Every structure is written in C-alpha cells, then in structure tokens.
C-alpha cells in the first residue's frame, strides 16, 4: 500500500499518488484511479492520513451542492424569477416564491422592486441535480439581500482554509478585526465592520489566507498581520 | 473554433454493443475480418469534362474526385514547379448530419491529409509542370466530393484522388507570342507521376484494431489513426483523427496493419488502371 | 526548394542552431499569466512563443449546442498576424482550422468532461511568434492553462515534433528544419499514462525510422513534462510565508 506523496505536498495533474487497492480515497473529482494506481487530477495539496489519501485543489471553480450557502449577484430577471451568478458552471435561479413572504403576482407586481440586476444576496442552494440549473432560496436565517459592507472574492477551492478547522481561522479574523464575516462556499466573502478601515484589514487578511493557503503556521501569522495592519491605521495601540 | 460535435447520428446501444462484442471476438457485423475492406469499386474517367476523374465506392460510401487544369503563376518559393491544390467537400445529401455551407473542419482535415501525402511523396512530379519556369506553370485543382457517407471517407477519398491523378490527361501547353500560354485541348499528355499512395485508416475498439469502419462502426471507435502508405511500403503521412488515445504499441501495430492492407488498395487501383489501357 | 549548399547538419553532427540531434530548444514556461482568464499559461520553445487561456466550465447559449452527459470543448488555435515572416491574415486559415480540431480532439481525452454536463470548456491558443512547433507549444500551454483553471484532468500534455533533416532524425525542429526537412512528426502524450493524444506525420519515413522517431519524441516529451510540472509548482513554491 505505498503512498508516494507526503502530507501537504503540492501535487499536479497526472502525478502518481499511491498504488494499491486498499488505499482509501476521500475526494470529489481531484483523485482518480486506473487499475491499482491513484493519480491526482488537479494541482493541489495532498492530504495523507494512514492509508487515506485526498487532494485539496488549489485552483478551481465552485461546483454547487444542495444546502451550500453562497453569495450571488443578480444578472437577469424574468416575470417570476431571477437569474443569479454564483461563480459556478451553471447560473442559479431564484424563484419569487423562494424570496418573498407573500404570493407574487406578476400582473400587479414587479420583481425589480425586490432584487434588481447587480444586487448581491446571501442564498442557500435548495435544489441541484446537474440536469437542471441550481435553485436558490433566501428564506432562512442570515439569508437575503446584502446592503452594506464589502465583498471580496477568493479562489473557491481555498474556502476551507479560510474557514479553518472548526472555524478557527475565520473566527480569529472576526475577533481580531471586529468584523462580521459571511463566507459563501462559492468563494465570495461578505465583510461588515465597525468602519471601512476595519473592513479593509479583514479583506487584506482574507487575501493573505488565500495567497498562502498551502503554507503552515498560517493562523498565527495572520493574527500578527492583522494586529500590525490595525496599528498602522491607528485602530489599535 | 473547433467545437465538440453535438449532432451525431444516434446508433442504438444494442447495436453498438453487438458490434463491439463481435469485434472482441475478431468478427464484424457484416461478416468481414478485422483487417478486411468492404467491396471496392473504382471507375476511372467517370466525368468526361474533367481532365481526370474517378468514381470510388467502398461499401456504401461514394466519392467522386475530379481534376481540372489551368495555367497560372508559381509560388515564389517554388518558381519552377507546377501547383496542385486539393479540396474536399461533403455534400449535404451525403449524410443526415451534413449541413450546407463551406467545407467544415472534417472536410478541411481530410483534404489536407490527402494533400500532404501526395505532396510529401511527390506523387505528381511538379517539376515537370513548369511551362515558362518562374512565370507560367500548370495549376492542378483536385476536387474530392463525398456523395454518400457510409464510413471511412478518408481511404475512399484517397483512392479516388490517386486514381484520378494516375489516369488524368492534361492538355499540352503551347507558348505563344509575348509569353502567352494556351492549352491545346486536342493534344493531351498524361500527368507526370513519381509514386503512388493510399491511406488506410485504422480504428480502435476495446484494444482491437480494425480497418475500413462503416459509419455505424465509427460510432464505437475509441479513436482512429490514418496512415498513408506508398507503393514501396514507406509511411507517407499520418494523422490521429479523433478523440481518444493510443499506446505506443498500438500505433506501431496500426502502422503494420495499414502497410499490409495497403496492398489490397494498390491492387484495386492497378486493376482499374489495367482496364483503362 | 532547399537552397543550394544549405546543410542542416554540419560535419560535427550539429544542427543549424548548434543543437545536437536529440537536444530540445531552450524552454520557458509560466502559469497564471493572464488576469481575466480562469486559467492561463505562456510557453516559449526557442523562438516560438505561445499564450493559452481557458474559460469554464461555463454555460453556453444556445443550449442545443450542449450535451446532456458531458461538457463540450471549444478550441481555437490562432496565429496573430505579426507572428510570421510575412504578415498572416487574421482570418482563420485551413491550417488553423485543422490544428484547432486535432488539438481539441487531443484535449477531449485528457479532461474529465463527464463531470460537467451541459457546459462548455473554452481553450484559446494564440501563437504570438512562430518558429516551428507552434501546435506542440500550444497544446502544452493549453494543458498548463487547464490545470491552472482547476479543471480535473488525467494528466498534463507534453508535446514535441521530431523531424528528419539531411536524412537524420532530430528532436524539436525549428523553422529552417521544418521548411527544408524531409519529415515533421508532431506528437503529444499524457506522459504518466503513456498515452498518445495527438500524432501527425507530414513527410515520408520508413517503418523503422518511425519507430526511432517515436523513441526520440518520447525522450523529449519526458523532459518537457518535467518542465511543465516545475512551472505549475513554481506558482506556489515561490510564495513564501512572509516574515512577521
């Protein structure tokens, strides 16, 4: 059962990761098997645990999953639904019924009053089966239109690193910057802070995590970085 | 821009399965061996108006090639050579999947593969086709038209092209005053030919190699490799012509298979030629 | 016509640019060179310079152009007008149409297209300077750009052309060797898997020569594959954690 790569080693497409039937693969689309051999399908970080192997993609787009929280932007509207860009291979649909708390009558009412092209929203994917485009809902706690703060985009495959183990990274950033942060799994992050300067520091920290995803000891470095940046802006003594 | 085709003919899964499992056993649905061509008919001089022509039928595939001749200026880098241009078109009625319009990527690829094999092997001795070196040369237009598509268009088209060149008679050029050139249609000469070439397309189905696939068999090919072979057994061009992959051994085996099968095609051409003379 | 007295291999057995018969041209590869594209790469082999970019998987309209069980691929290989000695018309030539097709077909067997039904993956290759080997440099740049876009694929694609000049097989031909050589055989492989995804031969070879040409190509391909892997890793290794 030889696993041929180290934990947290950078691997590339076509790289032989392991040989043997008993190697367990825990991965979506990033590892594939030919006979007894396991290869990486992407550029990513190898995760090796005993006889288990996984590759976390370093690049890539967001692929929708039911129940994912995403941040979308309205790109079009029809009579009874909106088309929403969620940075996925498929645009998402938001039906009026999943957005409003009352029945919607297209003869008397206009969708534009609720969400217009360019509006941002936090939404949940309620239906997706690959044969049709994903359906969103904004009914639920924390979902709905975004009206303040800032949005920053990161490579979607690096979202898990931004969240960290049990939320360790993102919670630290929230605490240190005193910002509220909502991380869409599609790599859009919403930051609302006590001032634009606080938001700015939070965004710098998020970009740093994105850039240095594949390095170790990141949480401590980011904490120090945030304090430094806050000091520079006179937000911390 | 090249786009994954989305208008393919649908062959039933049942038929695909039976074709594939037969090939696995070394058999074909029409009773052929894996390395066997369908019935081949070659009729030279099929179009009287053309300086050369050939009708070729391979199974249900029908191709007619024709040669027209003119006088023009040579290319600057080959001032003492005649010019040959190969063009192919798949007419819309030849298949439900063909559309009217200029030649698509498949027709262009086919014409270019044929052109390259003919050119690289110097099948036509272009150096004998200068009329006034550096100024006036013969221009040859070899047009290949596919009229019915039942698979293996390339091998059929190459047969038609080769037979056309071998049987063509071009009008003699007469140089008049002030370097004016006239073609004398009363006096015709054969095209100067150096060599003969055929193309054998080898397809792969479940690691088995077959030749001369029908249009239905083409649907189950994982990939195919066209190999042009000269009459003296050299490789005169190759083109992997589909998605899918080959191993090195498969490619070497395909070349051997093509070389062997080319003998059938040369025999057919030579038989057709003997009837003309 | 080869000019009188032009020797493509000299008395010492070296080529016009001083290379040995089995020597590659100098290679430069860089990943992530464009801001807008989902993935991009630059490949330079000798004097040949190519940029490739990838968009997708993304939706495509009209919908009837999509397939229900897989992503389609749209590929354009294009030479810009100033890439050649004589200006090349920007309109697609028959050559470019053919090369776009063979490159698309090569990439179709590399990408896991079945993961993304009803979408398109767009691959664009621009040759900005042409000195032979543009399709092989182009397909390498495309494979790097696909990896950079995070699109799952079986392997990178490494490619090279073997030529026959003055009766001898040589690796990675340049423009002069292409113009006056006797054969040009571009080949692209998924090296880890030992699979050939693109193979063309323009010229005449015996069966034995073809066998040797394949071996020579493979030697070059394994080297280029290493450079590709290095180029991909470089993007990350270079980012050192900043000292605090």
Image (cartoon, coloured by chain):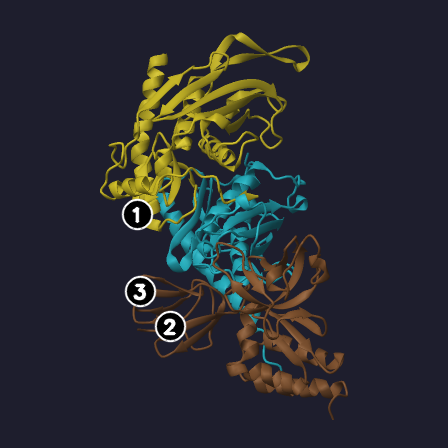
Contact flag, marks 1 and 3 (Cβ < 8 Å): no
Disc number lying in front (3 or 2) = 3
Name the residue that disc number 1 marks: B207
* Residue B30 tag number: none
Q: State the SS at label 3.
A: loop
Q: State the SS at label 2.
A: loop
Question: Which chain does the residue under circle 1 lie in?
Answer: B
Report which quarter residue C176 is drawn in.
top right
Name the residue that disc number 2 marks: A4
Relative to B245, is B98 on the left or the right?
right
Q: Which chain is brown?
A: A
Vertical placement of residue B14 versus B86, above or below? below
Report which quarter residue B233 is drawn in.
top left
| Of residues B240 and A198, the one drawn nearer to the viewer in this rendering | A198
Question: Which chain does the residue under circle 3 lie in?
Answer: A
What is chain B's hue in the picture? yellow
Pointer 2: residues within 10 angstroms few (<14), some, or many (20+)? Answer: few
The location of residue A141, given as percent across then percent down, is 60, 75
Name the residue that disc number 3 marks: A36
What is chain C's hue in the picture? cyan
Query: Does the rendering let one see residue B249?
Result: yes
């Amino acid at each position: 059962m030889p696993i041929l790569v180290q934990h947290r080693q950078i691997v590339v497409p076509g790289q032989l990761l392991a040989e043997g039937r008993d190697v367990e693969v825990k991965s979506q689309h990033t590892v594939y098997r030919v006979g007894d051999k396991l290869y990486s399908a992407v550029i990513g970080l190898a995760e090796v645990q005993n006889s288990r192997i996984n590759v976390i993609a370093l690049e890539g787009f967001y692929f929708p999953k039911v129940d994912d929280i995403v941040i979308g932007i309205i790109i079009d509207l029809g009579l009874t639904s909106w088309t929403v860009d969620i940075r996925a291979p498929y645009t998402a649909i938001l039906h009026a019924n999943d957005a409003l708390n009352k029945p919607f009558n297209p003869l008397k009412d206009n969708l534009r009053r609720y969400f217009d092209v360019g509006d941002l929203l936090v939404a949940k994917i309620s239906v997706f089966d690959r044969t049709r485009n994903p359906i969103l809902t904004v009914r639920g706690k924390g979902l709905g239109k975004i009206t303040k703060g800032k949005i920053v985009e990161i490579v979607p495959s690096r979202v898990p690193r931004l969240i960290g183990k049990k939320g360790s990274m993102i919670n630290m950033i929230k605490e240190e910057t005193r910002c509220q942060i909502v991380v869409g799994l599609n790599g859009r992050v919403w930051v609302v802070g006590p001032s634009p300067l606080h938001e700015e520091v939070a965004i710098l920290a998020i970009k740093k995590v994105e850039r240095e995803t594949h390095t170790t000891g990141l949480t401590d470095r980011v904490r120090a970085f945030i304090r430094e940046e806050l000091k520079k802006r006179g937000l911390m003594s | 821009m090249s786009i994954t085709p989305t208008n393919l003919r649908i062959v039933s899964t049942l038929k695909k399965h039976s074709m594939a499992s037969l090939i696995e056993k070394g058999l074909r649905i029409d009773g052929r061996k894996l390395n066997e061509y369908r019935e081949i008919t070659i009729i030279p001089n099929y179009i009287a108006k053309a300086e050369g022509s050939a009708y070729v039928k391979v199974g249900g595939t029908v191709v007619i090639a024709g040669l027209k001749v003119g006088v023009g200026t040579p290319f600057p880098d080959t001032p003492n050579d005649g010019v040959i241009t190969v063009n192919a078109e798949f007419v819309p009625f030849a298949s439900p999947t063909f559309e009217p319009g200029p030649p698509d990527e498949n027709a262009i690829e086919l014409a270019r593969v044929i052109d390259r094999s003919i050119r690289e092997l110097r099948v036509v001795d272009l150096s004998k086709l200068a009329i006034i070196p550096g100024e006036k040369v013969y221009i040859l237009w070899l047009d290949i038209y596919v009229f019915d598509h039942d698979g293996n268009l390339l091998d059929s088209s190459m047969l038609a092209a080769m037979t056309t060149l071998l049987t063509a008679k071009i009008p003699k050029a007469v140089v008049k005053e002030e370097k004016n050139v006239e073609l004398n249609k009363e006096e015709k000469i054969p095209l100067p030919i150096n060599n003969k070439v055929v193309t054998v397309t080898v397809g792969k189905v479940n690691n088995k190699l077959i030749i001369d696939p029908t249009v239905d068999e083409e649907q189950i090919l994982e990939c195919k490799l066209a190999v042009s072979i000269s009459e003296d057994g050299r490789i005169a061009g190759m083109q992997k012509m589909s998605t899918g992959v080959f191993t090195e051994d498969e490619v070497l085996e395909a070349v051997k298979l093509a070389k062997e099968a080319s003998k059938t095609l040369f025999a057919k051409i030579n038989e057709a030629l003997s009837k003309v003379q | 016509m080869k000019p009188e007295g032009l020797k493509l291999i000299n008395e010492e057995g070296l080529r016009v640019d001083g290379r040995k018969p089995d020597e590659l041209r100098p290679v430069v590869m860089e990943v992530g060179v464009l801001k807008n594209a989902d993935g991009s790469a630059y490949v330079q082999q000798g004097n040949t310079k190519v940029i490739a970019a990838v968009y997708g998987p993304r939706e495509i309209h009209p919908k009837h152009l999509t397939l229900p069980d897989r992503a389609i691929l749209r590929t354009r290989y294009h030479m810009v007008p100033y890439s050649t000695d004589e200006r090349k018309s920007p309109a697609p030539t028959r050559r470019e149409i053919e090369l776009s097709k063979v490159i698309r077909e090569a990439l179709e067997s590399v990408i896991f297209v079945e993961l993304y039904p009803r979408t398109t993956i767009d691959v664009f290759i621009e040759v900005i300077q042409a000195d032979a080997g543009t399709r092989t440099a182009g397909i390498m740049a495309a494979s790097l750009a696909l990896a950079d876009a995070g699109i799952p694929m079986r392997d990178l694609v490494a490619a090279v052309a073997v030529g026959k000049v003055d009766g001898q097989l040589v690796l990675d031909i340049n423009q002069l060797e292409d113009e006056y050589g006797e054969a040009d055989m571009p080949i692209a492989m998924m090296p880890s898997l030992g699979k050939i995804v693109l193979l063309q031969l323009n010229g005449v070879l015996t069966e034995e020569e073809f066998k040797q040409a394949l071996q020579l190509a493979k030697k070059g391909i394994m080297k280029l594959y290493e450079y590709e892997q290095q180029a991909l890793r470089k993007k990350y290794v270079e980012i050192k954690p900043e000292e605090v």
